[in-house]
Image (tube, grey):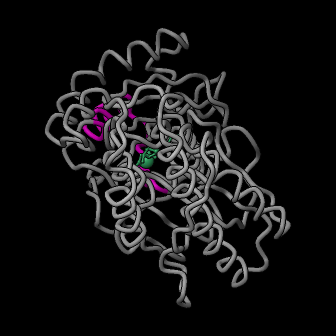
Amino acid sequence: MANAAWPKLCLGIETSCDETSLALVAEGRLLDQVLASQSDLHALFGGVVPELASREHYRYIGPLLDELLKRTQVSLKDLTHIAVTRGPGLLGSLLVGVALAKALALGLEIPLIGINHLEAHLLACGLNSSLEFPALGLLISGGHTNIYRIEAPEKFQPLGKTLDDACGEAIDKIGNLLGFPYPSGKLLDQAACLGIPEINFTLPYIHNDNLNFSFSGLKTSVATYISQHLSSLKWEKPIKEVKNLPQEVLNLCASFNLAIAKTLALKLERAYERNRDLKYLWMAGGVAANSCIQKEISKLAKKLGLSLRVPPPLFCTDNGAMIAYAGYLLACKGYYHDLDLETIPRGQVIPWDYKQLAN
Ligand code: KG4
Ligand code: ZN
């Protein structure tokens, strides 16, 4: 099973939502990644259409694998492990990646490793710096807003989660109201950078004793503000260039961004107060690329004396590298799955069902 040049050469496959991405990690180092995004297609519908997403994964996945092998000069027989996102995600999309992973593992007679997509987002912090444990983890994506205590690559203890909208979802919905194309996080952030956060939106769901989030109230306040104060203004939609937007819209984006960033920081600080032995703070997921959130969380990390790790922007959004890297970390500990690995759709708990090779 071992390959002489790289005793561990792991292929990672990601198809949980609307990015098809594959990557190779050799001995913990990323060799290369290929990625096909479907966001332009789904933008026509204002959100991801599951049936279309799985068809697109099916169309892209074979050619992407060929391209990755060609670019890295790796042949299939060099692979030692196959890692694949097994959930959470869109079931039809997950099945495309898992079917390919099972076929490769079976044909090449190498271990299959099913990866928890959410945990892989946070483990991506190891792609550009060393991973140290135990760490406090903040995962902020289009579907999730979670806080974890992380003891090891396979040991994530959930501390808090969103009770309704994820912060990325709230951003995308407000973005949609303002006329940003889906997903709106990146452009809305650019708009926010040109605005002044002069509107004091009430920070949502903070007067309690827990580490959970709720962004639906903030979303309603911002939507109400837009209809009461911005409806008479005109600007080009869908928005392509943020510099042409009215200052009032830029200010709203800045204020909304800041309210989200402050809420995240407040709950993270609370989590740290209850886990004072932690020295590291990891932040990942598509929304971790948001500059205002990065600024607020950096300030918090400094205040608490925590060392902050954030993956580069390309590895904050969905990507194959994080899956290959998580697979590599689990392979180092001998974890694998049999070919009866199940895919887990969004909303269901991912079982901890690894098998472990004897050393
Ligand atoms: O992690 P991700 O790619 O997909 C999920 O697993 O959900 O996160 C998608 C979210 C979307 O809400 C999108 O608007 C946001 O990440 N996003 C960004 C940026 N790129 C994507 N937000 C701010 N700045 C960005 N550069
Ligand atoms: Zn994701």
Which residue is at a point 46% across and 17% down the rendered structure image? Answer: 68
Which residue is at a point 68% across and 45% down the rendered structure image? Answer: 126
Is residue 330 at all visible to an observer of this figure?
no
Q: Is residue 326 magenta?
A: no
Q: Quadrant of the C terminus?
A: bottom right
Which residue is at a point 27% across and 53% down the rendered structure image? Answer: 343
Residue toward you, 263 or 200: 200
Q: Which residue lies furthest to the bottom in this view?
A: 209
Which residue is at a point 53% across and 28% down the rendered structure image? Answer: 24
Q: In this view, does 104 lie to the left or right of 210?
A: left
* Prevalent SS, magenta region: helix
The image position of residue 280, as x and y in percent, is 76, 62
The image position of residue 244, as x and y in percent, is 49, 28
Give, as a single range, the part of the protein colored magenta. Answer: 97-118
Q: Which residue lies furthest to the left in this view?
A: 51
Q: Is residue 27 left or right of residue 72?
A: right
Q: In this view, does 273 lie to the left or right of 22?
A: right
Is residue 314 at all visible to an observer of this figure?
yes
Up the image or down, 251 lies above or below 135; here it is above
The quarter holding residue 36 reads top left
Q: Is residue 112 magenta?
A: yes
The image position of residue 21, as x and y in percent, is 41, 30
The image position of residue 103, as x and y in percent, is 28, 33
Up the image or down, 325 lies above or below 294; here it is above
